[in-house]
Image (spheres, rainbow, N blue to C red):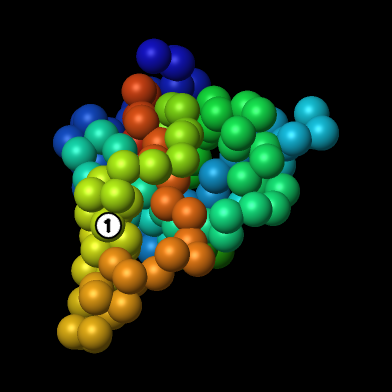
């Protein structure tokens, strides 16, 4: 586990998972296919200690993950500026893990359905439509470390 400089702002593991669940998106950072740093914002969902996201089946992100599967993701569940304090109130996480393309059709469908439940909870046709989509690749990140941090007003 990496040490946090501002340990007074570290939250419990349970709260870190909650922050991750409440975030609308995450930023996935990796080593790009050409060996340069690369980061991309993603819609994601968590199932247990795994993150699922969908992607095109080809492209720079896919090439990068295939070549260098170790990743870092960051997510912010809330933030607002505190001008009088020259600061920001926030709740965020940093997590590390390894990404892999999901090839198992059952797991792939579970990931797509979970994404639909998170991002389109009131759209009853979204789950069958997503489950039948063959154009999207589904990726899984097995998280092996997560740290949460918060500063409240």
Tell me the SS state at disc 1. helix
State the image quarter where residue 30 is shown.
top right
Left or right of 83? Residue 143 is: left
Quadrant occupied by the C terminus: bottom left
Left or right of 86? Residue 74 is: left
Residue 135 coordinates in the image, percent (x, y)? 50, 66
Q: Can see residue 85?
A: no
- Give the residue drawn at x 42%, y 51%: 138
Residue 24 coordinates in the image, percent (x, y)? 39, 63
Pick whichever, 62 or 32, lies toward us.
62
Pick whichever, 39 or 19, lies toward us.
39
Left or right of 24? Residue 110 is: left
* Tally of numbered discs: 1
- Give the residue drawn at x 52%, y 33%: 72
- Give the residue drawn at x 47%, y 34%: 99
Report crowding for label 1: few under 14, some 14 to 19, many 20 or more residues within 10 A (C-alpha): some
Residue 1 coordinates in the image, percent (x, y)? 39, 14
Q: Can see residue 40?
A: yes
Looking at the picture, does residue 32 appear above or below residue 44? above
Residue 45 coordinates in the image, percent (x, y)? 32, 54
Left or right of 83? Residue 50 is: left
State the image quarter where residue 111 is shown.
bottom left
Looking at the picture, does residue 138 appear above or below residue 74? below
Residue on which the image places disc 1:
109
Pick whichever, 88 or 57, lies toward us.
57
Looking at the picture, does residue 39 appear above or below residue 36? below
């Amino acid at each position: 586990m990496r040490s946090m400089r501002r340990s007074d702002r570290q939250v419990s593991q349970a709260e870190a998972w909650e922050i991750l669940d409440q975030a609308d998106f995450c930023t996935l950072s990796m080593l790009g296919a050409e060996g340069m740093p690369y980061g991309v914002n993603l819609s994601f969902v968590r199932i247990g200690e795994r993150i699922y996201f969908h992607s095109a089946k080809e492209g720079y992100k896919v090439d990068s993950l295939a070549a260098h599967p170790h990743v870092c993701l960051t997510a912010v569940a809330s933030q607002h500026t505190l001008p009088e304090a020259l600061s920001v109130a926030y709740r965020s996480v940093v997590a590390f893990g390894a990404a892999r393309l999901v090839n198992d059709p059952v797991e792939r469908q579970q990931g797509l359905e979970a994404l639909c439940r998170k991002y389109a909870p009131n759209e009853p046709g979204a789950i069958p439509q997503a489950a039948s989509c063959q154009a999207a690749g589904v990726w899984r990140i097995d998280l092996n470390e997560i740290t949460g941090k918060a500063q409240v007003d």
